[in-house]
Image (cartoon, rainbow, N blue to C red):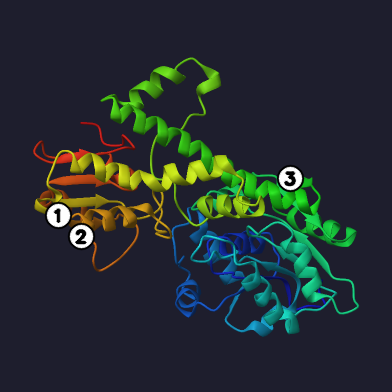
Amino acid sequence: MRSKEYDICVIGGLGHVGLPLGIVFASKGLRVCLQDINEESAEVLRQGRMPFVEYGAEPILKEVLSSGKLTISLEPESVSMAKYVIIAIGTPVDEYLNPKTRQFLEFIHDIRKYLDPTQIIIIRSSVFPHTCRQIVTELRDDQEWHLAYCPERIVQGYAVQELEKLPQIVAGVTEKAVEEASELFSKITSKIIHASMNEAELVKLFSNSWRYIQFAVANQFHMICEDFDMDYDRVRNIMVEGYERAKGLPSAGFAAGPCLLKDTMQLSAFYNNSFLLGHAAMMINEGLPNFIVKGLKNKYDLSQKKVGILGMAFKSNIDDIRDSLSFKLGKILRFHGAKVFYSDEFANDSAYIPKEELVKSSDIVIIGAPHSKYKELEIPGNVDLVDIWNIIKQ
């Protein structure tokens, strides 16, 4: 390992998956290079600040920068200078919501000149099944390549806390890839679970699809309750109290972000669009903004109303707005003539207004993301509050 300048190079190292992983490895004494193309995030990091919300990360970041264990690079040549190369970019989807595996493989082709068979290449993000085998085919030049698949399973915003607690799944195309990847991840977690490549790829997609379906069940129950003028949260509380078999039922709310829907779609595409339960979950979760607007249309002429959306991030207490359903909700409201205001406690945008101003200016307030700072927010009696998360007690 010492024959290389770095122990680890994380490609996509300034993103939500690669950055927490990189600083945790650096905190264990490994020499880590975070390679990316995001100049803005790189400048923020060099100042010892995180470019996004990741709880507990900033003190570690400052420590590993000060010790010299962490390097930030915008140069692709850095990839050739590490023993382990961790690829932390995801498989994008096209306009028809199908995985663009060719784009992922083209990326591998582009960085091929910086890779060599002595390195251990580790894929970290969600991939379409069999992608890892295709990567090896893309790399192969009459030489044996050592590629491992070690999927991340962290909750965004809490990766630093979870990386050392969660078991790490390790699969590989060669025994050396499995052994080396297992040894590497053993430095940050006490439990390694070995799997075949096919098993590991499906575990990742199954995990996110399972969570997405659970949220869909809760959202469907919420819709049923609303249509019968009942409170889903009250029904749920009665259902789970003292009844262990039902305790996993979630509250209702927007199920969004860059992973859950995408991985459900990838699994559906892999299964020849026969993943009927996944399709139903997509219709329910993606249809929730329409359901909310339909309920408001039955009560009001929306063209005469001002509507404020509190929380534009895709989940509570983070600043990531990728694939947030709050924006879909806003578009539907504007289509029906409503004037719409946005506010968020973590995400920054010049178009957003403070939560107090939003409440004061709106006839209707909708909770888009249940940030904890909204719990004590006072909503005037003349403002109609739509709070499917049941975060604000009135």
Residue 136: x, y in percent? Answer: 80, 69
CB of mark 2 within 8 Å of CB of mark 1?
A: yes
Q: Is residue 377 in view from this perspective?
A: no
Quarter-wise, where is residue 380 in the image? top left
Cβ–Cβ under 8 Å for marks 3 and 2: no
- Horizontal and vertical percent position of residue 388: 31, 37
Compared across the picture, whether 183 is left or right of 347 comes to right
Q: What is the C-alpha distance between the residues marked 3 and 2? A: 45 Å
> Horizontally, is 348 left or right of 23 in the view?
left
Residue 190's disc is: 3
Q: How many marks?
A: 3
Q: Which residue is mark 1?
A: 357
Residue 86 in the image: x percent, y percent? 69, 67
> SS class of the residue under badge 3?
loop
Residue 112 in the figure: left or right of residue 341: right
Residue visible at 46% across and 38% down?
216
- Picture quarter with the C terminus: top left
- In the displayed structure, 101 sits above or below 157; it is below
Location of the N terminus by quadrant is bottom right
Q: As shown in the figure, which amino acid type bears the numbered disc 2?
A: Ile
Q: Amino acid at mark 3?
A: Ser
CA–CA distance in space, label 2 to label 1: 7 Å
The kind of residue on which mark 1 rests is Glu
